[in-house]
Amino acid sequence: MITGASSGFGEAMAWRFAEAGCKLVLLARRQDRLESLRDQLIFTYHVPVHTVILDVRNVAEVDLLPGQLPEEFADVDILVNNAGLALGTSSVQDNSIDDAVTMIETNVTSVIAMTKAFVHGMIERNKGHIVNISSIAATESYGGGSVYCATKHALAAFTTATRHDLVGTAIRVTSISPGAAQTEFSLVRFKGDQEKADAVYRGFDPLTAEDIADNVLYACTRPEHVQIADILVLATNQA
Ligand code: NDP
């Protein structure tokens, strides 16, 4: 189960996991993107793919989701909480509260809800892996990103505490923390301003979505007694 699979890291993970032969549940809001991806994956790798069109901020729907999946997809072994976003670059004085609430609900509340929804099945089967897509912003805060950094700090704390809660089960919990990667992330952050989005990646060679997908697949394919707790992935010339 990959949230935020309609672009960027999530889409790249879908390709990597399909290539590895996994059955996939892909979740996002953009139906056209998700269904086109599903068709391409089935055509290329002949793996079963189910799409869920959902806003992860709708925690009531998230809670019902495990019971609504078709039987073939019901036992989710790997949950990748990837859906997330930054909005705006304004200082703490000029932050938009609406943007702040959207970031908190998407980057934190939805992860709590998705994890709670799927962890019971994992505990019952004593099998599972939860991967949370964090960020370098979970450890390094920067001006103009106060709320986004706060959400990723909160996610880091939630991920570590989840790992503690699940000690004694076979469920693994992993955090992947990317540095700057070229996806639609900056376009969303700058609300569609392509020039501003492109400027983020000027002057260095950013990570690609596939770089992050490779690390997620790596963490999920270690022997069962190996739990990758955290991977920090930076572009070579990002300090
Ligand atoms: P993208 O914008 O390319 O992808 C974000 C994905 O999240 C999209 O598929 C989007 O789908 C989905 N999404 C956003 N909001 C919601 C929502 N409310 N409900 C359901 N799905 C949602 O960005 P990335 O791939 O770069 O970002 C993925 C994750 O990586 C995020 O958590 C981000 O914080 C993190 N990250 C990104 C970095 C970067 O430099 N790119 C660096 C560090 C971390 P849709 O709009 O169709 O719903």
Image (spheres, rainbow, N blue to C red):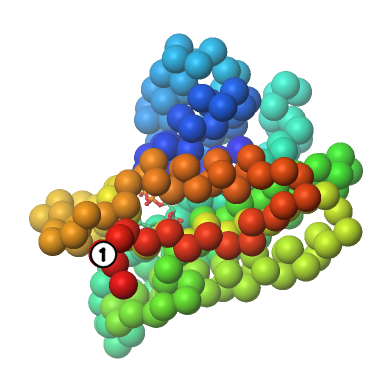
Residue at the image point whose x is 86% and y is 53% from the top: 169
Evaluate whether residue 86 shows in this view: yes
Evaluate whether residue 115 shows in this view: no
In the rendered image, residue 35, in percent from the top left (x then y), is placed at 44, 24
- Considering the image in quadrants, where does the N terminus appear? top right
Q: Please, is residue 117 above or below residue 234 in the view?
A: above
Say few, some or many: other residues with alpha carbon within 10 Å of mark 1 (under 14 / 14 to 19 / 20 or more).
few
Residue at the image point whose x is 47% and y is 63% from the top: 232
- Considering the image in quadrants, where does the C terminus appear? bottom left
Residue at the image point whose x is 39% and y is 79% from the top: 141
Residue at the image point whose x is 43% and y is 68% from the top: 136
**Label 1 beta carbon less than 8 Å to ligand 1:** no
In the figure, residue 94 lies in which quadrant?
Answer: bottom left
Exactly how many numbered labels are in the figure? 1
Q: Could you say whether the residue bearing mark 1 is in a helix, strand or loop?
A: loop
Q: Name the residue under label 1.
A: 237
In the figure, residue 229 lies in which quadrant?
Answer: bottom right
- With 133 as the anchor, is 73 left or right in this view? right
In the rendered image, residue 76, in percent from the top left (x then y), is placed at 71, 36
- With 225 as the anchor, is 139 left or right in this view? left
Q: Amino acid type of disc 1? A: Asn
